[in-house]
Image (tube, rainbow, N blue to C red):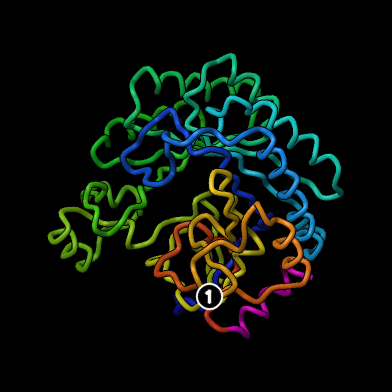
Amino acid sequence: MSKLTTLEPANNQGFQIAWETTLKCNLDCSYCGDGHDNSLPHPGLKDSLETLDFIFQYTDIILSKKPKHLKHANLNVYGGESFYHPKIIDILKHARHKKDQYSWSMSISTITNAVVKPVLWKRICDHIDYFTVSFHAESTLQQQNLVKNNILYLKEINKPLHVGIMMHPKHWETCIDMVNWCEENNINYNARQIDHSILDFRFNYTKEQSEFLTGTPPTAFDKINNLIKNGFDLSSSGRKCCGGLAMCSNECNTVTYVKGNNFKNWYCSVDKFFVYIKQTTGEVFTNKDCKMNYEGKVGPIGYLSDSKKIIENLKSGTSTIVCKNKSCWCGLCAPKAKDKKDYDRIMLKYVN
């Protein structure tokens, strides 16, 4: 394959809204990092509903600039663990009410650990269109059985879902058992490597585990790194798209795994395909992973406390995002190009 200069999704990609509704979680996974904080209270219902109003206003402006076949959004409600929020049903009801007021379509999805009691789980199912169940091997056997039963209920009521199995190198057999369980029950799944700092060796993989996750044997360079780092650090070598999407490189070659995931100084449309809202802090970012803003820095584009300013800036138009990060863990599927002229050319397909 020729040297990578452009990357875009092989199929249509809607606008993805990641809304971190709470940082509280009913699990405490070692690799979660800042993904949860049980010392903080759940955000209040009033503030959460006001955020939903902002989300719909923001999305309406984004989609007004896109061609008809791309006028679709997905609202991802998650945490922490969003279903741990005591007012989650009220929040979901408001979201479903709001989405019926616009000409464009929206689906409501969730990323959940599915450690939820059956009564609440069945109520939640009435308001969610698509489930991503994140399986964590550090949970108890009782919790894992609860997760499996909740997944089977989703299948029973024909709810679209897939399972993201967090492949923990120290709990590998439990993860492989979950892979086998999904295959036996015809459940869509994605075996995902654990993202982590290159200085954190806890989640490096063995040779066999590395081959399982990447589908390819390690190179000589990988083997040398293995000796130095006591395991294969797949986090630094790149990974597949979070949703398992196929992508087109240089407009002709379809790829599912990008070696390195390094797009530093590339022009990227991440802001036109993603927005990320942290309810607990009130920060609004272009994307959950890169957090690139329009000033060429990693940081928020604004705050919920001044949402009117964010909306005004969005209406007036913004400059192009230029990536300053060394790696892309999520946002890989946003069309991007090494050169501005290639970026402008491919973006003609995505923005009116």
Q: Give the overall secondary structure of the magenta segment.
A: helix
Most foreground residue, 232 or 311: 311
Q: Position of residue 292 (x, y in %)?
A: 53, 67
Q: Which of 350 and 19 is in front in this view?
A: 19
Q: Which residue is drawn at 59% across and 67% down?
A: 8
**Magenta-colored span:** 340-352
* Closer-to-camera residue (247/342): 342
Residue 246 lies, with reference to residue 339, above or below; the image says above
Residue situated in front as seen by the camera: 129 or 184: 129
Residue drawn at (25%, 60%), measured in percent from left and top? Answer: 218
Instruction: Tell me the element at label 1.
Output: loop
Give the residue drawn at x 65%, y 25%: 125
Quadrant where the N terminus lies? bottom left
Q: What residue type is labelled 1?
A: Gly
Q: Is residue 295 magenta?
A: no
Residue furthest to the front: 305
Q: Is residue 124 left or right of residue 230?
A: right
Magenta region includes residue 343: yes
When the figure is inspected, residue 167 is found, relative to residue 155, above or below; the finding is below
- Occupied quadrant, residue 9: bottom right
User: Relative to 273, is 55 above or below?
Assistant: above
Residue 237: name its quadrant: bottom left
What percent of the width, then of the height, locates residue 68? 82, 59
Residue 76: image x %, image y %? 61, 43
Residue assigned mark 1: 296
Q: Could you classify mark 1 by the number of other residues whose Cα lies within 10 Å: few (under 14), some (14-19), or many (20 or more)?
A: some
